[in-house]
Amino acid sequence: MARKFFVGGNWKCNGTTEEVKKIVTTLNEAEVPSHDVVEVVVSPPFVFLTLVKSLLRSDFHIAAQNCWVRKGGAFTGEISAEMLVNLGIPWVIIGHSERRALLNESNEFVGDKVAYGLSQGLKVIACIGETLEQRESGSTMAVVAAQTKAIADKVTNWDNVVLAYEPVWAIGTGKVATPAQAQEVHCELRKWLNENVGADVAASTRIIYGGSVNGANCQELAGQADVDGFLVGGASLKPEFVDIIKSAT
Ligand code: G3H
């Protein structure tokens, strides 16, 4: 089954109202391949979701950067999946390594969040990835397989899941994975899905790469057979994000 190229822009905890408007203007004026060819999803901080939704071109979509693990209630500071649905936000990023590391989100907690978000009708960009120490000790596949298993244990329908492989050592470091390194892990992940979830899910699930993707390195990464797109951090705040979208063709 053909997998549509996916480019996500994770703005993380950045931006003022004026900066956000500037980024959206750049995106709205960009000439990019059609929505049949590439799916573009940008992820502003929560406080700018409504503003971006009101201004952004209709062929680009929006993701929140997180949501609560269950139904909302007495959880100060949290944002529920139901609220995102109510606002008309179709996507959410779950399990980003910054949250896993800084907020101690475990594999199981991430799996629960993915399942709950899906159950409420959200589409999920589920993030996995190994640290430098884990890579150097040869445990990359064991780590990403365990992270994926914790999601697979809770999820029965993968139609609305995009898996983002983001090696922690490549995030925000300027040290991008080589195309061969990315392809190797993506290929292994697809095999893992094939063996543990099913052939259809393995064939149709998009596995995107994140970690120091920029306008200069995206083409070669995009050319890898099992790289179905990107989750971009720093470069998604800059005009070069448009070049990354164009790498879909
Ligand atoms: O979610 C995006 C990733 O953390 C990648 O961030 O492109 O700044 O390395 P980066």
Image (cartoon, helix red, strand yellow):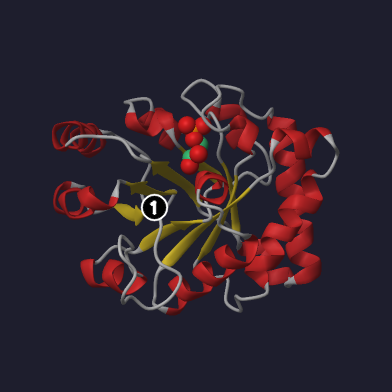
Q: Classify 95 as above or below 209.
A: below
Rendering coords of residue 49 (x, y %): 23, 53
Q: Classify 65 as above or below 217.
A: below
Residue 133 picture quarter = top right
Which residue is rendered at x = 61% and y = 27% of the image? 176
Q: Classify 109 as above or below 94.
A: below
Rendering coords of residue 162 (x, y %): 54, 58
The count of marks equals 1
The quadrant the N terminus occupies is bottom right
Q: Is residue 154 left or right of residue 34?
A: right
Rendering coords of residue 78 (x, y %): 33, 63
Residue 13 picture quarter = top left
Residue 246 can be seen, yes or no: yes
Residue 248 can be seen, yes or no: no
Kind of residue indicated by mark 1 = Gln
Which residue is rendered at x = 34% and y = 46% of the image? 42
Q: Is residue 37 left or right of residue 95?
A: left
* Residue topped by disc 1: 65
Q: Is residue 173 left or right of residue 240?
A: right
Residue 246 picture quarter = top left
Which residue is rendered at x = 81% and y = 32% of the image? 136
Rendering coords of residue 94 (x, y %): 49, 58
Which residue is rendered at x = 32% and y = 26% of the image? 239
